[in-house]
Amino acid sequence: MKYAFVSDIHSSMEELKLVLQQIDSTAPESEIIGVGDLFECTIGKKKLDGTTYPLLKNVMLNPVGFEELITFPSIRGNQEERIQLISVSNEPLLTTISELPERMRVSDALLIHGHQWPYDELPPERILIGEPLLFHGHTHTSSWSVDGKKQPFQFFQSISVPKTCVVVNVGSVIDHTEWVLYDDSDRTITFMKANIA
């Protein structure tokens, strides 16, 4: 089975369209899964003061037509958590956001957004224990590591994943149009980028 992991869209409709078009043309049989931060919360974490908002348009970006592109399952990111924290809306979208799981298992891999540990660090042992393969986002930087050591990669080149502690950052849709293709049948990952050939 092939999976297309997309993360950190932050309500960027045009960049999401580019990525979805590339997935459709290069891996149409893959199942698309979101790795968090689908939406952009417009209230920064430093501005949280206990205020709650009755309308989602007051706390998040949701361009016309954006929701229709989110046809795939996803985990929640820190943006969704903040939207949920400060919203008292009865809009159905808030219910959808609140029901996103923190983690998801896909084949032999664990998906978690990455805001659960310090920024730009590898996941801690409490998360990695017993997990041979973990995918995350959050830092907007494509990368991968084996047993805590970062590994080189090139976009569009398939990488065989060893059966040890592998951590993959799938990059971001916003600003980078990056995503990762995972083939669990041959245990390969391929870093993809939609705006270069």
Image (tube, rainbow, N blue to C red):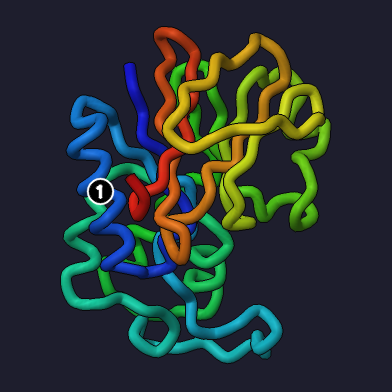
Q: Residues within 10 Å of mark 1 (few under 14, many from 20)?
A: many
**On-image quarter of the C terminus:** top left
> Where is mark 1, residue-wise?
20
Q: Position of residue 98 (x, y in %)?
A: 43, 59
Q: Is residue 98 visible?
A: no
Q: Which image quadrant is residue 186 in?
A: top left
Residue at 56% from the left image edge and 29% from the top image edge: 110
Please, what secondary structure does the residue beneath circle 1 have? helix
Q: Position of residue 88 (x, y in %)?
A: 43, 80
Q: Position of residue 161 (x, y in %)?
A: 58, 16
**On-image quarter of the N terminus:** top left
Name the residue at the front extreme: 197
Q: Nearer the viewer, residue 87 or 134?
A: 134
Amino acid type of the residue tagged 1 in the rendering: Leu
Residue at 40% from the left image edge and 31% from the top image edge: 181
Q: Position of residue 49 (x, y in %)?
A: 67, 90
> Is residue 156 placed above or below 146 in the rendered structure?
below
Residue at 54% from the left image edge and 35% from the top image edge: 154
For residue 93, side relative to residue 38 (left or right): left
> Is residue 59 placed above or below 72 in the rendered structure?
below
Residue at 53% from the left image edge and 56% from the top image edge: 77
For residue 34, side relative to residue 140 (left or right): left
